[in-house]
Every structure is written in structure tokens, then in C-alpha cells.
Image: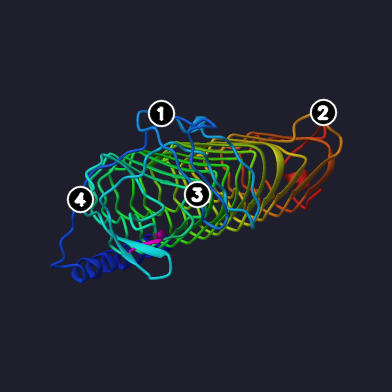
Amino acid sequence: MKKIISTIILTAIFLTCAACSNNEIAGNETSSTTSSFIGEQSTADNSITHSSDGSSSEEFDSSSNFESQDNVTSISYDETTVPTVPTDLKPSEGFEFESNGDGTCTLVKIGTCSDKDIVIPEKSPAGDTVTLIGEYALMSLKADSVTLFNYNYKIDERAFQFGKFETLNVIGGNPEIGDSAFSSCEDIETITFQNCNIEIGEYSFMSCGDDAVLKFVDCTGYIDEHAFQFSDFESISFDTCDLELDDNSFAHCENVKLLTISKSTISVGEYTFMNLGKNADIEIVNSDMEFDDRAFPYSSLNSLKISGGTLEMGDSVFSNCEDLTEVTIDCDNISIGEYAFMSCEDLTSVSICDNENSDNNIEIDDRAFQFCKLLTDVKIGSGNVKIGSYVFSNCADNLAITIAGNSYTADSIIKGL
């Protein structure tokens, strides 16, 4: 009931904000054109590079196509470095700008731009550096795709809201994406963030996508509350990232079939993935993961597989994931909180560090698997193993538990181990 009430309230808030937005721009002319991201990684003689002070040198070859983000060079950076990626993509022309009188400007309208594959320019025709895409500037934009390359400033609230384009690429730079900036862009099929330090605001991609693929590659930064809530994604992936995902940021993405995390450090807030998926599989490899309480409750999951890295799991993280059937965790250091998998009613097998290592650190808190009524097979490896009380209470009567090669029943370790 709490879940339903929460959903109704959040939906009402969003609809109210959208209605206010439409009233504010009533009477204004909204131009729309087309855009898309296609190209190949540039060579040393045909590229655009940018320094941290915003200076650049350009040489474009409009005949070159960028067909795969896999060809973008992976880069490294820290908090004092602006991530930049070489490109030979020609920036789109025809936009309208407002100068700030200090060498910077704001992109305010689509103007006469008629590209189907839009590449947001870094400078105006007058030579001012773009520091902001203004509120409503490209609202209801009709395009094939939109690309931001090495963009280091802000996309204002509702800048692209209700857009009609299929592909969004954010490559390089330090983009700050304002609240609701891309909300209700329902035609998007692919969203890629790559080689950038991102700050994504509340509701910025709320209700986006059409069986979309969402990818984060070589990214650092922060994703605010509700950022991707209620979006229609088929898959979500994080590869070589260091990110903080705030509360509810991916909640109610109900069509996800695959969530993958590889070689990343991810901090996951409360309810971040609540009610996620349609019999989704979660695969996490060589990553350091920290899950806050109730990160995935009521999600429709098929399997959870975690290998390598470290795992710190709060309370009730996967509670009431009634479709979950298989849990496999193989990390050197594992901490599983209270009620973590409680009432996963279809769960049949659990494997935790079922390997030959003798130096595993495994801590499973009280009632972690309570009320998993179909759970019949649990295998836990050796090392420093701590089992709380009532961990496997009210599971299947024929539950077989093996810990460090020794056999137990749920009752024999009901007070812990």
C-alpha cells in the first residue's frame, strides 16, 4: 500500500510540474528540427581537443561517421581535470544564442538548424563559449539524435523536455543536467554517457525511453533522486564507473531485463532500484558495491550474480523480490544486512563464496533469508564466517545448508554461528 501511495504522489507531482511548464511557454514559438550521433574516432590530424580553460582547436571532416561509441578512446581524469575526447564531428549550425557579454553565452532556441543529427556546439558564431542550454530552449525537439561532446556547463531545467529523438550521447566533459531536462522524451532508444564527470538532477530523465538501452562507460559523478524514475529501459549498464546513485533514482523502471555492472565503484541509495525489472537478471563483476537499505525491494528479478570486488549490503535490500530464483555471490569481503532477502518466495538456491579460498570474510545478519519458502539449497564457503540468528527461519522444510563443508539445518543454526 505504501508503495502504491508513493507512486501516486510522485506521479501527481510530475504532472503538475509539466502542466506549469506548458503554461509558462504558452504563446512562445517552439521550433523543432532533427539530429543524430554518427561518426568515427578522429585521428591526430583531424580532431578537436579542449583544455580545462575551455580553449580549443578545431578541424572537422564532415564525411567522417562515428558509428560506435566503442571506438571512443578511454581516458582517465580526476576532479581537477576536464575529461575530453577527440572528435571530428562538425557542430550543428543555426541555433540562437544570447551573449552574456563576458565571452560566454546561452543557447536559447533551435533557430534555423535543420540537422537530423544534432551536435551541440561549444561556441556561438560570435565566438562566445556556450555555458548554458537555457530552460525550454530545445523543448519538444524533433530529431534522430542529439550529441554533446566535451560539454562542460549546464543544461537547464526542461531544456529538452518532451523531445522526439531516438539517440542521446553525452561524451566527455563535465555536464550538469538540470531537473527534468530530458523528462518525457519517450522515443529515446539509446542513451550513452561516456568518458565524463556527470551531475544528473532530479527527474532529469523521468518517464523516458522506448525499450531503451542506457549505458554509462568510464564515468564519475552523481545521479540525483528520481532522475530516471518510471523510464522504459530494456537494459542498464555501468562499465568502469565511479558513481553515487541517490534514492529512487531508477525506481519503477519496470521493463528492465538486464542490469550489468563491471569494474566499477557504485554507491546505491535507498529505494534506488525499487520495483525494477521484468524477470531481470543482475550481473555484477569485479566491482566494489555498497547498497543502502531497501535498494531493490519489490523488484521483479530472475537471478543475482556477483563475482569479484567487495559487497556491503544494507537491510532489506532485496526483500520481497518474489520472482528471484537464484543468488550467487563470490567476493572476498561480503556483508549482508538484516532481512536482505526476506520473503523472496521463489528463491530456491543460494551460493556464497562456494570456492576453495580459506580467507573469505562473510557476514550474514539476522533473518537475512527469512520466509524464503522454496529455498532448499544453501552453500557457503570457508574463512571468517559469521551467521546471525534466524537467518534461514521459515524456509523450506527440506532446506540443506552447507557451510565450510559442514552440513546444517535451519534449526541447528537458528541462534547463529
Disc nearest the viewer among 1 and 2:
1
Amino acid marked by disc 1: Glu
Task: Give the spatial CA distance, label 2 vs label 3.
Answer: 54 Å
Disc nearest the viewer among 2 and 4:
4
Asked if the stretch drawn in magenta spans residue 90, the answer is no
Mark earlier in primary sequence (1, 4):
1
For residue 98, what is the image quadrant?
bottom left
Mark earlier in primary sequence (3, 4):
3
Residue occupied by mark 1: 67
Mark earlier in primary sequence (1, 2):
1
Task: Give the spatial CA distance, label 1 vs label 4.
Answer: 26 Å
Task: Give the spatial CA distance, label 3 vs label 1.
Answer: 24 Å
Range drawn in magenta: 128-134
User: Which numbered disc covers residue 112?
Assistant: 4
Q: Position of residue 354 (x, y in %)?
A: 75, 31
Mark earlier in primary sequence (3, 1):
3
Query: Front-most of 147 and 5?
Result: 147
Q: Pointers 2 and 3 in contact (CB under 8 A)?
A: no
